[in-house]
Image (cartoon, rainbow, N blue to C red):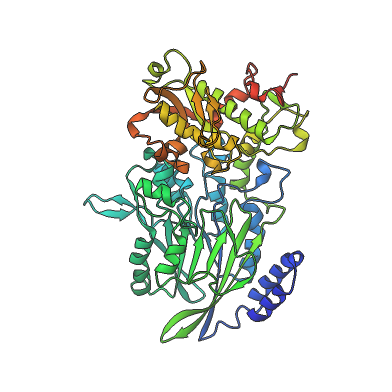
């Protein structure tokens, strides 16, 4: 078998064009004489990981023109790895379910196709992600019962009948492979209360990841006699990301995978999801920047991350003595799908092909597309019934809205002057769906929430997720020391700082996403209610209405399909 040093030498001497071939060579080197070293004093363990699949079995269902992406495009790689290493461990670091159109377009009782495919591929464990919980506790419990692999979250607890906190999902899974006892510890980001509504996480508490790891890792080593401990974390390595938001919300550090890795002895390998990062980008041996090796498996099935651990027997216990890590990009073509996956996906593809009442007449600029997106979202919100208390605040007029404006500006070239916009285009533009929340906001709070949009107009940058289009309002950009400018009402007058107005928001921003809720000091008492449909469904209803009157911001590149 080729030595790790020899493989690393070959990789170091080649340019980018040779990566695919070299990774294939690394795969063969990893599996070439697998059984030979597994003698009395040596073992090898292969771990394969995905993360943040977001329901994507194959991108072809929504984006036929796109190169392979989704779990079905990883299935051939997983099959090759399993053929070379029959005892490999297959893991996912969370956000497996929510994000693709499946949950929106399939009946609630249907097992999501992504979970059915994961079961077919032989996954051993999945860690809960924040998006997995978007459909609520009941949905997660139903999915867990319908799948053959373990669902993990050691730092998520419920209150037991005796008043004590008890794990909601299994804290860990024990796997016997290659003559080794392998413990997989699952931890998820404690930032979930920042992003999810209270009803979605009712009864659940999300604890500090480092504290949970310090509690469980010694138990796995001592009580379970684990030879290998793998941390399967739905959390990124960037501890600074969302730190300020977490401090304002009073929740532990959301992206604590790196902190746990360096602070908690006893871990042998960490899989870090949530941040959509992919790594290592080249063949690596050893831990590199952290105390133990880390895999980052990317997102939406764009790649699979692999680790090959070598263990030697020392003082009666197995110890990891080497670690080779690499990533493999998704195949261009998906693997054949089993019936339980193909049938529901066919229903989804048929629904996504349905036309809307609009077509493109020209290719919009990025700025024009963003302005149109915000205006369309505003019209969709206006079509929703007002919860109690909303009518009184509007004074007989329409409510305002502050909804995401920076949709993904992606569409095929032949859509211009071509067929009508289809439902799949809406899913390209809006990656994540959100509920619509009506809130009673003061004029000053509206100004604070609109400030990132004003800065965006001036080219000042900032977080993309914080840019909200001021629907029904006029923004007078500021100058000099006042980049936020002024928000004007329908009559062109400034909003009264202390008067309350009815405003539609997404639940993501209401719950604290992008830090805007804390910045504007939003209070739970200001929430008036939730719309009966989510933003994407509300938009689809408007775009399929032949009587839709296009907002002026869209008229330069969109037109009714019949014209």
Where is the C terminus found, in terms of image quarters? top right
Q: Is residue 54 left or right of residue 409?
A: left
> Can residue 475 be seen in the rendering of this structure?
yes
Q: Residue furthest top?
A: 396
Q: Position of residue 112 (x, y in %)?
A: 53, 45
Q: Position of residue 543 (x, y in %)?
A: 62, 25
Residue at point 34%, 48% (across, down): 250
- Depicted 38 relative to depicted 446: above or below: below
Q: Position of residue 510 (x, y in %)?
A: 43, 36
Closest to the observer, 434 or 203: 434
Q: Residue furthest left?
A: 162
Q: Is residue 282 left or right of residue 49?
A: right
Q: Is residue 131 left or right of residue 374?
A: left
Residue at point 26%, 51% (across, down): 160
Closest to the observer, 387 or 373: 373
Q: Position of residue 520 (x, y in %)?
A: 41, 36
- Depicted 425 relative to depicted 258: above or below: above
Query: Image quadrant of residue 197?
Result: top left
- Depicted 446 relative to depicted 316: above or below: above
Where is the N terminus found, in terms of image quarters? bottom right
Closest to the observer, 207 or 557: 557
Residue at point 46%, 57% (across, down): 239
Q: How many marks?
A: 0
- Depicted 315 relative to depicted 183: above or below: below
> Can residue 174 be seen in the rendering of this structure?
no
């Amino acid at each position: 078998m080729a030595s790790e040093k020899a493989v690393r030498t070959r990789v170091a001497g080649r340019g980018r064009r040779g990566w695919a071939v070299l990774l294939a060579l690394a795969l063969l080197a990893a599996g070439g004489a697998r059984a030979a070293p597994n003698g009395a004093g040596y073992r090898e363990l292969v771990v394969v990981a995905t993360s943040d699949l977001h329901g994507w079995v194959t991108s072809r269902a929504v984006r036929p023109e796109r190169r392979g992406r989704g779990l079905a495009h990883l299935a051939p790689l997983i099959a090759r790895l399993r053929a070379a290493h029959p005892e490999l461990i297959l893991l996912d670091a969370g956000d497996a379910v929510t994000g693709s159109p499946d949950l929106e377009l399939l009946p609630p009782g249907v097992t999501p196709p992504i979970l059915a495919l994961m079961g077919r591929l032989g996954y051993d464990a999945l860690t809960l992600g924040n998006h997995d919980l978007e459909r609520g506790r009941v949905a997660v419990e139903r999915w867990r019962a319908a799948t053959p692999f373990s669902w993990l979250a050691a730092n998520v607890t419920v209150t037991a009948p005796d008043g004590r906190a008890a794990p909601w999902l299994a804290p860990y899974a024990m796997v016997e492979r290659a003559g080794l006892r392998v413990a997989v510890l699952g931890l998820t980001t404690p930032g979930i209360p920042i992003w999810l509504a209270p009803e979605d996480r009712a009864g659940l508490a999300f604890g500090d990841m480092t504290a949970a790891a310090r509690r469980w890792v010694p138990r796995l080593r001592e009580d379970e006699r684990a030879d290998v401990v793998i941390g399967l974390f739905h959390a990124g390595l960037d501890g600074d990301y969302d730190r300020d938001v977490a401090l304002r919300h009073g929740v532990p550090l959301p992206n604590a995978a790196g902190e746990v890795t360096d602070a908690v002895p006893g871990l042998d390998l960490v899989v870090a999801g949530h941040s959509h990062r992919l790594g290592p980008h080249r063949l690596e041996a050893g831990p590199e920047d952290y105390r133990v090796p880390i895999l980052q498996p990317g997102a939406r099935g764009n790649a699979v991350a692999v680790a090959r651990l070598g263990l030697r027997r020392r003082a009666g216990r197995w110890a990891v003595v080497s670690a080779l890590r690499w990533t493999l990009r998704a195949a261009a073509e998906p693997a054949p799908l089993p019936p339980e996956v193909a049938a529901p996906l066919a229903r989804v593809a048929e629904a996504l092909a349905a036309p809307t009442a609009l077509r493109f007449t020209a290719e919009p600029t990025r700025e024009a597309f963003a302005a149109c997106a915000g205006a369309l979202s505003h019209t969709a919100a206006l079509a929703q019934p007002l919860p109690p208390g909303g009518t009184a605040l509007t004074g007989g007029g329409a409510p305002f809205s502050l909804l995401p404006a920076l949709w993904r500006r992606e569409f095929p070239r032949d859509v211009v002057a071509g067929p009508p916009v289809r439902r799949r285009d809406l899913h390209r533009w809006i990656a994540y769906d959100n509920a619509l929340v009506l809130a009673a906001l003061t004029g000053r709070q509206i100004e604070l929430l609109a400030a990132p949009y004003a800065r965006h107009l001036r080219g000042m940058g900032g977080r993309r997720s914080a840019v909200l289009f001021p629907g029904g309002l006029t923004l007078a950009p500021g100058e000099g020391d006042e980049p936020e400018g002024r928000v004007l009402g329908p009559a062109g007058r400034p909003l009264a700082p202390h008067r309350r107005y009815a405003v539609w928001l997404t639940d993501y921003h209401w719950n604290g996403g992008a830090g805007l809720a804390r910045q504007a000091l939003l209070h739970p008492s200001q929430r008036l209610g939730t719309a009966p449909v989510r933003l994407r469904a509300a938009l689809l209803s408007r775009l399929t209405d032949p009587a839709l009157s296009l907002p002026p911001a869209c008229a330069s590149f969109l037109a009714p399909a019949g014209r």
